[in-house]
Image (cartoon, grey):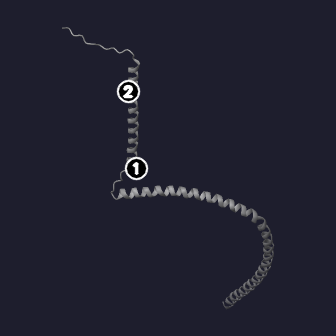
Amino acid sequence: MLSRKNTAERTAAQAWDYLSSAMAGAGESAKDAGKHTADLASAKAAAATATAAKLADKAGKQGGKLADRAGRKSGKLADKAAAKLAEVSDEAYARANLAANALAGRKPGLPWGVIVGVGLLGVALGWVAATTARAAIERQAENEQLELAESDTVVVTTPTYEN
């Protein structure tokens, strides 16, 4: 039994040593590969930076023009959106106030604007009707006077008395 335990311990120790050396070797390989990759990446990044600088110079001019155009269009869109938002928010505010008043048991106020508007419309229509009627009456009176003036013969009847 003792030999069996020693064999198992020896095998475990050998496995541990093998694993430790494999891990150390892998670590060194990874470190070397990392350094090599970093060097390559640095070189490629420098080349890409130079190319990007050249392209940025070319694109800078066009980019400025496009940015101006985009700024104008976005300004117009923002103005339209603000106008619609103002409309919607005004209506939402009015509805919210009406709902709050209804929940509080308050009756809605009289539409004084409509009442005054209808009153003014009635006054205007009355004035137009009165002016038209007055003009019609004056025309009728003038026509009657013309008819009397045109008739040359005046028939006068004298009463006869029989005694």
The kind of residue tagged 1 is Gly
Percent position (x, y) of residue 155? 33, 14
In the displayed orientation, state which residue is furthest to the top: 163
Q: Are marks 2 and 1 in contact (CB under 8 Å)?
A: no
Closer to us: 151 or 129: 151
Residue on which the image places disc 2:
141
Percent position (x, y) of residue 113? 40, 50
Figure check: 36 above or below 72? below
Figure check: 37 above or below 79? below
Q: Quadrant of residue 126?
A: top left
Residue drawn at 38 percent across, 42 percent down: 123
Q: Quadrant of the C terminus?
A: top left
Residue on which the image places disc 1:
113
Q: Quadrant of residue 69?
A: bottom right
Closer to us: 155 or 108: 155
In the displayed orientation, state which residue is furthest to the left: 163
Residue drawn at 40 percent across, 26 percent down: 142
Residue drawn at 65 percent across, 58 percent down: 73
